[in-house]
Image: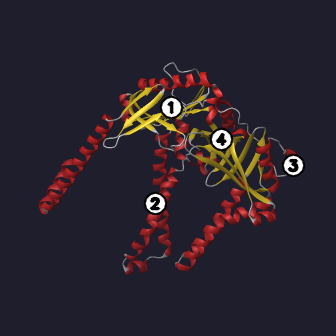
Amino acid sequence: MPAIGALFAFNVVREDPRIALGSVAVAVALLIAAMIAVLAAWIQWMRFTFHVEGGALRAEEGIIVRKSTRLTPERIQSIDTKANLLFRVLGLVTVDIQTAGRGKEAEVSIPALTESDARELAAGLRVRHERLVSELGAEAVVDIAVMPEPQAPTTSHVWTLTTAELAVVALTSSGGLIVLAAIVPVVGALMPVVSEELPVELADALTLGPWIVILGILAVAMVGVAWIAGSVGTALQYWEFVTKRTDDELRVERGLLQRNTRSVPLDRVQAIRLVEGPLRQMIRRVTVGVDSAGLATGGEFGPTVLHPLLTAQESRRFCDLMVPGHMFPELRRVPKRARRRYVIRAIALPMLVAGVLAATMQYGWLALSIPILSSGWGLLAFTDAAWGISGDVVALRWRTFARTTALVRRRRVQSVTVSQHPLQKIAGLASVSVRVAASPMTAVFQVRHLDERDAIGIVEWVSEGVERTEKWTSVTV
C-alpha cells in the first residue's frame, strides 16, 4: 500500500510540478509551527516556579508578562490531580488548585510533578491549615480538600465500576445524541443542494417512497455512528472508575487517556443529584452526583459524578454510606390541574415552528407531528414533577431531557423563591426554586406548578424549620 501511494503521488507531481512545491511549502510551515509550539511550551515550563512559604503557595509564570499568584490555605477549595496517557507512563501528574471565585478553571495549575512531590505539596498546605485550626478554632477555618499523604487514612467505603457496568454506561450515554444533534442540521442543509443537482429525468422518475427509504437508512447510519462515537468517549472517560470515602472526604478517580482525581470534603456537599437519562431510566438505573461549594457546577449531573450507574435501591445505600445525612423523603406529585400547563409549555414553541414550516415548505405539513410528540413529553414532565420533605431534607424532582431528583439539607439552602404569574394565581399554583451554593454560581433546583399551599409550606419549612406535613394536600406518588 505505501508503494502504491508513493507511485500515485509521483505521477501526480509529474503531471503538475506546482503540486510538489505547494506540498513542500505546507510541510515546512507545519514543521516550523510545531517547533515553535514545542519551544514556547518548553520556555513556559522553564519560567514556571512555585514554592510553599509560611504555609502559603506562591506561583510565578509567564514568558513576557510575569504573573505571580499567592494562595493561602483558607482560599483553597480543592486540590485535584490529572494525568494524560504520557504522564501516566512517566509517573507524573498535573496538580490543579481551585479557589472559590475561579470557576471551572484552576487558580494555579502545576504540570509535570511526580506523585511524591504532589503529596508533599498537599502536606505542606495541610500543616498550615492545622495550625490555623489550633489558633482560631475549627469553626473559624474552612476545611480544604487535599490529596492524602503517603500514609493515607483508612478507606471506609469503596465503590467501583465493573466492566459490564462500564459497557452499560457507555451504551446509555447521551454523548451520541449530542453528536447527532450536530450532524442532523448539516445533513438537512445539504439535502436541498443534492436534490437540485439531480438530473431532471432522474428526479421525475423517483417517487417519494424511495426517498423516504434512503433518508431512513441515512438517519439510522447517523444514529449508529453518533452512538458509537459517544459510547467510546464515555467509556474512556469512566475507565477504571473508583469512588472512595476516606474519613470525611470523598475521592473520585476515573479516565484512561487522562486519569483525573478529585477530592470532595463531605462538609462541602451542598446537594445530591440523582439523574435518570431516557435510556438509563428504561433499565432502571440512575447516576449519582453532588454539588459542592467551591467546585464549579457541571451541568445536570452536578460538578462531580460519584457513581454513573446504580439501581434505585443501590443509590439509597450508596448515599447513606458515602454522603450520610441525606435521607430520601416520600415524593408527592404536583396537582392534576397543572397537567395542561406542562403540555402547553411543551408544545408552544414546536407549534410555532411547525406552523412556519407547514406554510413555507412543500412537505412542511409533516412537521405538525412535532407538537404531538412534544405534548407527550409535556405529559411525561408532569408525571415526573414531584417534591417531598422528610426531617432535615427537601427533595425536588423535575424533567428537562433527563429526570433529576435533588436532595438538599435545610442548612445548605441559600434561598428559596416562590414565583406565581396571573394564570397560576387563578389556578392556585406556584413554582418553587431552591438555590444552593455551588461556587462560583448557585445551583438552582426548580419544580413548576405546585399547589400554592405546598409552595408556601416549603418556604416556611426553610425559614422556620417547622414541618407542616398535615397541611399538605398533594397526591402521593
Residue 271: give its label.
Answer: 4
- How far is the residue under mark 2 from the one under mark 4? 35 Å
Pointers 1 and 4 in contact (CB under 8 A)?
no
| Callout 2 secondary element | helix
Q: Earlier in the sequence, mark 1 or mark 4?
A: 1
Does 94 sit left or right of 415 as displayed?
Answer: left
Looking at marks 3 and 2 on the same chain, the residue that comes earlier in the sequence is marked by 2
Q: Residues within 10 Å of mark 3 (few under 14, many from 20)?
A: few
Could you tell me which secondary element the residue under label 4 belongs to? strand
Q: Which residue is mark 1?
A: 72
Pick the front one: 276 or 266: 266
Among the two numbered marks 2 and 4 on one chain, the one whose residue lies closer to the N terminus: 2
**Is there any visible trace of residue 177 in the rendered image?**
yes
| Badge 3 vs badge 4, beta-carbon distance below 8 Å | no
Image vertical order of residue 231 relative to residue 336, above or below:
above
How far apart are labels 3 and 2 at the CA level?
A: 51 Å
User: Type of residue at label 2?
Assistant: Ile
Nearest to the eye among marks 3 and 2: give it.
3
- The picture quadrant where one finds residue 251 is top right
Q: Is residue 130 above or below residue 415?
A: above
Q: Amino acid at mark 4?
A: Ala
Q: Which residue is mark 3?
A: 471
Residue that numbered label 2 is attached to: 183
Q: Residue at x 28, y 42 (%)?
A: 40
In the rendered image, is residue 330 in sight? no
Considering only order in the chain, which callout, 3 or 1, is on the residue closer to the N terminus? 1
